[in-house]
Amino acid sequence: MPFETMDEYIDSFPAEVQKVLERIRKTIRKAVPDAVEAISYQIPTFKLDDRNLIHFAAYKNHIGFYPAPSGPKDFEKKIAPYRSGKSTIRFPLKDAIPQDLVRKIVELQIKETNKR
């Protein structure tokens, strides 16, 4: 089913997953209030200055974040358990998602996007 809005996407999941997605959405919104919500590649996307900034999606056992930015050693150490390939982050749904890490991912992604 093609989604036109982030609300449609989030509403397509069970209530437990919706809560997780809404919390992530709120964290991203706080980190970058000027970002615009969109659907790209049929998943929730935040755009900044008409460029895709960050995507996230729900799967059976995890929440995926794309792309995964690089950062200082302390950041890389914190994100290592969640990395799945060079540009993918997977947060298991069975665990609480570290919202401070979500915020840091967004902040670093803003810096990387602005470099391009």
Image (cartoon, grey):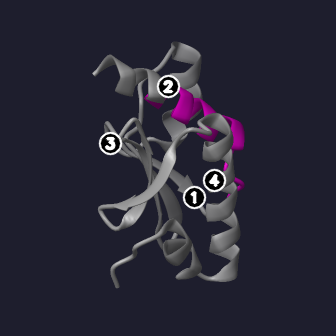
State the residue in front, 35 or 27.
35
User: What amino acid is labelled 4 in the image?
Assistant: Ile
Q: Is residue 45 left or right of residue 18?
A: left
The residue mark sitting in front, 1 or 4, is 4
Distance from label 4 to label 2 (Cα)? 16 Å
State yes or no: residue 20 in magenta. Answer: no
Q: Residue 28: give x, y in percent of width and height.
A: 61, 44
Distance from label 3 to label 4 (Cα)? 21 Å
Q: Which residues are magenta?
A: 94-109
Distance from label 2 to label 1 (Cα)? 21 Å
Which image quadrant for residue 113?
A: top left
* SS category of the residue bearing label 3: loop
* SS category of the residue bearing label 2: helix
* Residue occupying the point 72% across, 54% down: 96
From the image, tell me which residue sits under label 3: 85
What is the number of the mark on residue 92?
1
From the image, tell me which residue sits under label 4: 24
Which mark sits nearer the N-terminus, 1 or 4? 4
State yes or no: residue 108 in magenta. Answer: yes
The residue mark sitting in front, 2 or 1, is 2
Name the quadrant of the N terminus: bottom left
Residue 25 to residue 80: above or below: below
Residue 110 can be seen, yes or no: yes
State the residue in front, 6 or 83.
6
* Residue occupying the point 42% across, 24% down: 70
From the image, tell me which residue sits under label 2: 108
State the residue in front, 89 or 43.
43
User: What amino acid is labelled 1 in the image?
Assistant: Pro
Q: Residue 51: give x, y in percent of width and height.
A: 33, 39
